[in-house]
Image (cartoon, rainbow, N blue to C red):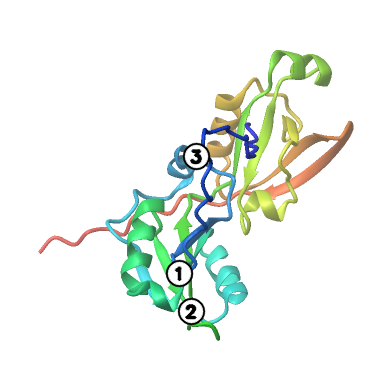
Amino acid sequence: MIALVSGCVPVRTPSPGPVPAAAPNAPRYESVVRQDAATIAELRAAPAPREPELSTGATPSGDERSLNSKGYARVGDGYVPAAAGNARAWIVQQGQRVGADKALVYAPDADGTTHAAFYVRYRLPFGATFRTVTADERKALDSDGVQIGDVVGGTPASDANLQRGDFVTRFNGKPFADRAAFQELLRQNLGKRVTLTIRRDGETIERLVRLGVVAKPAPVEHK
């Protein structure tokens, strides 16, 4: 897990000029997830569409709750000032850049800025990334297991209050070796309630998780 820290480093030039300000009328995109593109690709339910499905949003919070329940997670927000021109074209292009399945577009605000929320549909039997514990972590825990990474809202992992940084050391009371073993146990128990033993801040707790199922594509009728 890598934390990115940004900052400014002063650079001497023979004759420094003014730093150009950000264009006030330029559209902007704000990511709301920690996942990088590779992680999103691993978690998503299907390959990214050629362009996102655009629809009119009602309220951002209400729409997010509704879409979370259907397996969609908000990955970012776009803001297009009135002076930027064709908002729809920019939203479609930005949706293509981030691989969004849906883009909900809201009515312009008092300043004429159009807001769009971008969503990706995830495979959500569990709803979190995880990795095998390191040798040092194994020694500290006195156990094999995995560490939880990103947890997607509105998923079984989120509903069970799993948190980034949790160590999972037991699955239904039994130890397991590593990420591959944990992934296989999840696969074997799709649709069932399972108990995970968690180490968090030095304490051992248990969490009951109702795993989801992987949606199967609808059958194709041959005429």
Spot occupied by residue 29 in the image (x, y as percentages of width and height)? 49, 59
Q: Is residue 118 left or right of residue 217?
A: right
Q: Is residue 62 above or below residue 207?
A: below
Quadrant, the N terminus: top right
Question: Which amino acid does the dot numbered 1 rest on?
Answer: Asn
Question: Which amino acid does the dot numbered 3 rest on?
Answer: Thr
Whichever of labels 1 and 2 marks the residue nearer the N terminus, that label is 1
Quadrant, the C terminus: bottom left
At mark 1, the secondary structure is loop
Question: Which amino acid does the dot numbered 2 rest on?
Answer: Tyr
Spot occupied by residue 98 in the image (x, y as percentages of width and height)? 41, 52
Question: Disc 3 to disc 1, how far (Cα)?
Answer: 32 Å
> Could you tell me which residue is drawn at 55 percent across and 48 percent down?
125
At mark 3, the secondary structure is helix
Whichever of labels 3 and 1 marks the residue nearer the N terminus, that label is 1
Spot occupied by residue 74 in the image (x, y as percentages of width and height)? 53, 60
Spot occupied by residue 35 in the image (x, y as percentages of width and height)? 55, 43
Q: Disc 3 designates what residue? A: 39
Q: Which mark is residue 25?
A: 1
Q: Nearer the viewer, residue 179 or 8?
A: 8
> Could you tell me which residue is drawn at 83 percent across and 18 percent down?
140
Q: Nearer the viewer, residue 33 or 140?
A: 33
Q: Quadrant of residue 85?
A: bottom left
Q: Residues within 10 Å of mark 3 (few under 14, many from 20)?
A: few
Whichever of labels 2 and 3 marks the residue nearer the N terminus, that label is 3
